[in-house]
Amino acid sequence: MKHRLLLAAASLALVTGLGSPTAAVAQDRYCLQGRVWGYPGNCQFASYAQCMATASGTHAYCGVNPRYAYARRYRGYR
């Protein structure tokens, strides 16, 4: 019984660990920026619409995450 529980916990940790890098990359393309948020701001938005919905009614705006915009793109050769 203990071995099955340990195996299930290890499997869950493995699946969770494999899925998180792709989710983090897709999540941080836009940043909520403004006087309160600073620069680069709150960078947790996957779409511009999500960011603008959060910014509505405030003195904030949305911009592209600098980490995403200025990331090096490797072409497969050096």
Image (cartoon, rainbow, N blue to C red):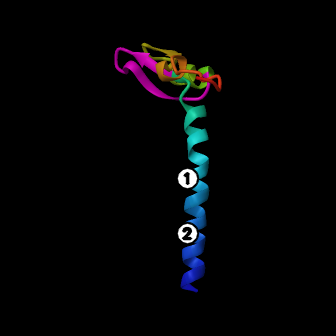
The residue to which callout 2 is attached is 9
Q: Residue at x 59, y 21 (%)?
A: 73
Q: Which quarter of the rendering shows the N terminus?
A: bottom right
39, 22: nearer the viewer:
22
Checking the image for residue 4, the label placed there is none
User: Which numbered disc flags the more N-terminal residue, 2 or 1?
Assistant: 2
Identify the element where label 2 is drawn: helix
Report the amino acid beneath label 1. Gly
Checking the image for residue 17, the label placed there is 1
Q: Quadrant of residue 75?
A: top right
The 10 Å Cα crowd at callout 1, few under 14, some 14 to 19, many 20 or more, is few
Start-end of magenta stretch:
31-47
Q: Magenta stretch: residue 38 in it?
A: yes
Tell whether 43 sits left or right of 49: left
Q: Residue at x 55, y 67 (%)?
A: 10
Please provide percent x and percent y for residue 30: 54, 22
Magenta stretch secondary structure, dominant = strand
Tell me: residue 1, above or below residue 25. below
The 10 Å Cα crowd at callout 2, few under 14, some 14 to 19, many 20 or more, is few
Report the amino acid beneath label 2. Ala
